[in-house]
Image: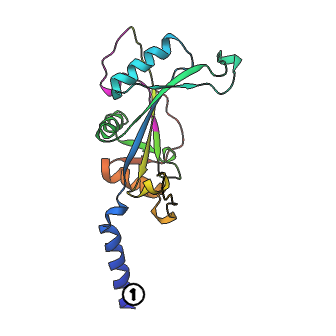
Amino acid sequence: MAQQVDRRKKAKRVIDDNVMRNISIDKIVVNICVGASGDPLVRAKKVLYELTGQVGVSGKARLTVRNFGIRRNEEIGVSTTVRGTKAMEILEKALKVKEYELLARNFSDTGNFGFGIREHIDLGIKYDPSVGIYGMDIYVVLSRPGFRVARRKRAKARVGKNHKVTKDEAKQWFRDTFDGHISNRTEVVWY
């Protein structure tokens, strides 16, 4: 019996020391949905460029919604994908705005998480009256080393179930990396 406990502890230690189990940020997707094309969309692209240093890609409406004045295939939003150290900087600024507190429902079953920011000026971008104020969604994709196996062109393979990032592992990574707090409240606070 004592040998089994020792083996379990040893196996746990090996898993903790395994560099292939380390979780890191794969990418961050920053999205601003304006709901209209034309000048507001151009201003949103400018805000996104100031934040990320990258030119955003326009997103189109899938359907026509007469009540909102949106036509099918009309450009209504802009988004960009950020990787590397720049992604970590943007996430750090965004979490500072949220006071390092996220809701439990912000985390997906696939080990990713996302949240919204109401005003872009909270991220340190100077207010410009000609641009206005835009809110944005930030979505963080977490991964482990070895996820490229599923995406590469030659010798593709599946990532094993035990190697994928789970919801609980993503929450623990958030707590450990940013010393964050995860709240379980269900009501939405509008302010």
Q: Is residue 116 magenta?
A: yes
- Give the residue displayed 54% in from the left and 43% down from the top: 186
Q: Is residue 186 magenta?
A: no
Q: Answer with the quarter of the image where residue 29 lies.
A: top left
- Give the residue displayed 37% in from the left and 84% down from the top: 5
Q: Is residue 87 left or right of residue 161?
A: left
Q: Answer with the quarter of the image where residue 173 lies.
A: bottom left
Q: From what the image shows, is residue 163 above or below residue 178? A: below
Q: How is the image coloured?
A: rainbow
- Judging by the rendered image, the residue that carries numbered circle 1 is 4
- Three-letter amino acid code at disc 1? Gln
Residue positioned most to the top: 130
- Give the residue displayed 40% in from the left and 12% down from the top: 131
Q: From what the image shows, is residue 164 above or below residue 16? A: above
Q: Is residue 124 left or right of residue 110?
A: left
Q: Dot 1, how many residues are within 10 Å of its Cα: few (below 14), some (14-19), or many (20+)?
A: few
Per the rendered image, the range of residues in magenta is 115-129
Tell me the quarter of the image containing the N terminus: bottom left
Secondary structure state at the residue bearing disc 1: helix
Residue 62, image x and y in percent?
65, 28
Residue 154, image x and y in percent?
48, 55
Q: Nearer the viewer, residue 13 or 95?
A: 13
Residue 7, image x and y in percent?
36, 83
Residue 115, image x and y in percent?
46, 37
Q: Is residue 109 left or right of residue 63?
A: left
Q: From what the image shows, is residue 166 above or below residue 55? A: below
Residue positioned most to the front: 154
